[in-house]
Image (cartoon, helix red, strand yellow):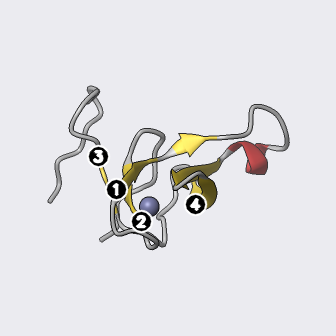
Amino acid sequence: MERRLRVGDLLRCPHCRGWHPVVKWHSEGTACTLRMLYFDCRGKRYYAGQEDLESRHQTKAASFGDGPTANTAT
Ligand SMILES: [Zn+2]
C-alpha cells in the first residue's frame, strides 16, 4: 500500500536516487493546480504528484518536523 503524498515528505528521486523534500510550488490557480507538488533535483524542478494522492514515486515521511498526524505504518 502506498502512502499519500504530502508537503514535506521525502521523495525517492528517479534521477539521482537521493531523497528530496516535496514542496508546493503554485500559490494560485485552480484547485487542481494548487494540489500539484514538486521536488527539486540539481536545480531542476520535477512534478511529484498530487497532494493527498499516491505518488508514482516512492515517498516517506521526513525524519524531522513530524506532526500529530504522522502515520508510522511501515
Ligand atoms: Zn535528485
Residue at far front of view:
42
Crowding at mark 1 (Cα within 10 Å: few <14, some 14-19, many 20+)? some
In three-dimensional space, the C-alpha distance between marks 1 and 3, rounded to whole angstroms, equals 11 Å
Secondary structure state at the residue bearing disc 1: strand
Q: Earlier in the sequence, mark 4 or mark 3?
A: 4
Q: CA distance from mark 4 to mark 2?
A: 13 Å
Q: Which mark is residue 47?
A: none
Query: Marks 1 and 2: CB-CB under 8 Å?
Result: yes
Q: Residues within 10 Å of mark 4 (few under 14, many from 20)?
A: many
Residue 68 spot, x, y in % from top left: 26, 26
Q: Residue 8's quadrant in the figure?
A: top left
Marking on residue 49? 4
Residue 37 percent coordinates (x, y): 60, 50
The first of marks 4 and 2 along the sequence is 2
Residue type at the position of mark 1: Trp
Q: Nearer the viewer, residue 34 or 64?
A: 64
Q: What amino acid is found at the position of numbered circle 4 in the picture?
A: Gly
Regarding mark 4 in the picture, which secondary structure is present there?
strand
Residue located beneath label 1 in the image:
19
**Mark 3 or mark 2, which is nearer the start of the sequence?**
2
> In the picture, which quadrant includes the C terminus?
bottom left
Q: CA distance from mark 4 to mark 3?
A: 15 Å
The residue pinned by badge 3 equals: 61
User: Separation of disc 1 and disc 2 at Cα?
Assistant: 6 Å
The structure residue drawn at horizontal position 54% and vertical position 41%, both measured from the top left corner, is 23
Q: Which residue is mark 2?
A: 13
Residue 72 lies, in percent from the top left, at 17, 48
SS of the residue at dot 2?
Answer: loop
